[in-house]
Image (spheres, rainbow, N blue to C red):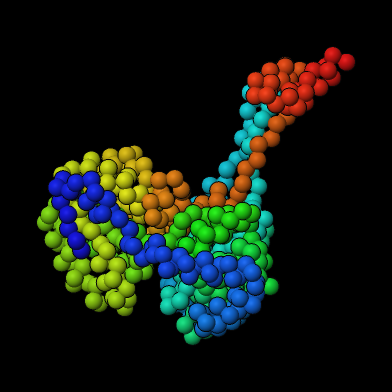
């Protein structure tokens, strides 16, 4: 990990210290993504099938989940099954209780306006796969979608290394009421969901995190006229830990490694007042990383890691708000003092016992969160992400007469005569 004394850095050096890995916006990567997306838009299923066979190792298939779910269930211990059911229960409880109510206001006598919510008709969920199929991400997306009342959920995930659909992903799908899953990954999966491709239907909004290719494909299709919406920029994982002297270096190192093992382009940062803690964390990282099954991935991610030495927690919070991390861990003695001051973060883990891992699996809120600084403007996935709101206007005759003359005056100030006439007609109705 590279170490910097924050006070000694000039403005440009601070920007470099907080920069994301360059692989995320590599021009060759972006060009490759554009080529795949454009080809799928042009040739549809034929292109999806070809890219699937070349990049995923097999032609995409729609795989029924029930048989594989039964296989996965049979392989779980009693304790593992309890843990899975706890995750489903907690995630479901949080999102079901987060449904927004209808909101009505009588802005003036006889004029009643409100906001009502409706689910999106059809959504696409992208579930990262490969060597580690993230069944937890399916729970974190499909459960809030179900709570919102989405009618149709289309799921795509890369085929597992042996081929086909991973049993645990199938089990997660079954637990969420999803009967089949497409085995297709990468940019071609995002394009298929965006435009429709043969039997894969076009969706209205695409959800889910992924590697740099997936993230770039989502951004590319969202910028197209008439393209589907996307949930948020959700690329390679990030964690910033803000720690004081009360932090345990072993816990901090463990949290950093838990994100570093996700992806070679993941980024982890430690912001601390204590040089002794920084030394301890580095020692713990060196001792632990080589023992991880995914040690090569974690070691590559750690090459982008930073330790920033600050003079106060105030300075640390300023850095966190500037960086806007996907995950922010407050490994401090009194996190309650700092939480109100955090403006930009996907999720906050307040205190030494609030492991980011808990949030990944079963705390309740979705672990699909904005990355690359998008937490300055985006929220993490919630039941609201699968809803859209509509305003409703209800006007009685007395209120219409009162409002019409004012509306006509304002319309003519903007030079919109047809607007004004539409209001004037309501006045004529009253006069009659």
Q: Is residue 396 something that shows in the picture?
A: no
Furthest toward the left, the residue is: 276
Query: Going 42% across and 50% down the picture, which residue do you hit?
Result: 374
The image shows residue 140 at horizontal and vertical percentages of 50, 60
Q: Which of 224 and 171 is in front in this view?
A: 224
Q: Which of 410 and 392 is in front in this view?
A: 410
Say above or below: 159 vs 145.
below
The image shows residue 169 at horizontal and vertical percentages of 52, 73
In the image: residue 64, left or right of residue 211: right
Q: Is residue 112 something that shows in the picture?
A: yes
Say above or below: 30 vs 396.
below
Image-quadrant location for residue 415: top right
Query: Going 25% across and 77% down the picture, which residue do you hit?
Result: 291
In the image: residue 299, left or right of residue 127: left
Furthest toward the right, the residue is: 432
Q: Which of 240 and 426 is in front in this view?
A: 426
The image shows residue 274 at horizontal and vertical percentages of 14, 52
């Amino acid at each position: 990990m590279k170490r910097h004394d924050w006070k000694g850095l000039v403005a440009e050096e601070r920007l470099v210290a907080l920069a994301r890995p360059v692989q995320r916006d590599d021009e060759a990567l972006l060009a490759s993504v554009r080529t795949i997306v454009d080809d799928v838009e042009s040739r549809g299923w034929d292109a999806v099938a070809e890219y699937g066979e070349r990049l995923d190792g097999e032609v995409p298939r729609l795989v029924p989940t029930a048989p594989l779910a039964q296989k996965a269930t049979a392989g779980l211990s009693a304790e593992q099954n309890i843990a899975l059911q706890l995750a489903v229960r907690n995630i479901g409880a949080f999102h079901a209780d987060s449904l927004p109510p209808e909101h009505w206001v009588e802005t003036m006598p006889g004029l009643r306006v409100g906001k009502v919510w409706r689910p999106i008709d059809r959504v696409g969920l992208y579930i990262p796969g490969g060597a580690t199929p993230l069944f937890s991400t399916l729970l974190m997306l499909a459960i809030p979608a179900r709570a919102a009342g989405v009618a149709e959920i289309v799921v795509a995930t890369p085929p597992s290394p042996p081929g086909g659909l991973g049993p645990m992903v199938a089990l997660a799908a079954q637990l969420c009421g999803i009967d089949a899953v497409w085995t297709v990954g990468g940019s071609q999966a995002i394009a298929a969901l965006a435009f429709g491709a043969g039997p894969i239907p076009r969706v209205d909004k695409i959800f889910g995190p992924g590697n740099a290719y997936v993230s770039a494909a989502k951004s590319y299709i969202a910028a197209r006229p008439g393209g589907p919406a996307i949930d948020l920029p959700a690329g390679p994982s990030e964690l910033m830990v803000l720690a004081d002297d009360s932090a345990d270096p072993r816990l901090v190192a463990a949290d950093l490694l838990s994100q570093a093992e996700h992806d070679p382009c993941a980024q982890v940062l430690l912001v601390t007042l204590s040089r002794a803690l920084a030394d301890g964390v580095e020692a713990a990282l060196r001792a632990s990383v080589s023992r991880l099954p995914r040690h090569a991935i974690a070691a590559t991610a750690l090459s982008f890691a930073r330790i920033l030495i600050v003079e106060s927690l105030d300075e640390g919070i300023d850095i966190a708000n500037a960086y806007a991390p996907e995950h922010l861990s407050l490994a401090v003695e009194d996190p309650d003092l700092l939480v109100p001051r955090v403006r930009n973060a996907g999720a906050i883990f307040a205190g030494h016992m609030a492991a980011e891992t808990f949030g990944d699996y079963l705390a309740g809120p979705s672990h699909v969160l904005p990355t690359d600084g998008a937490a300055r403007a985006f929220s993490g996935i919630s039941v609201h992400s699968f809803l859209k709101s509509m305003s409703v206007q209800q006007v009685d005759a007395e209120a219409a007469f009162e409002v019409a003359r004012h509306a006509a005056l304002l319309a003519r100030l903007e030079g919109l005569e047809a607007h004004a006439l539409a209001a004037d007609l309501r006045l004529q109705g009253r006069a009659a």
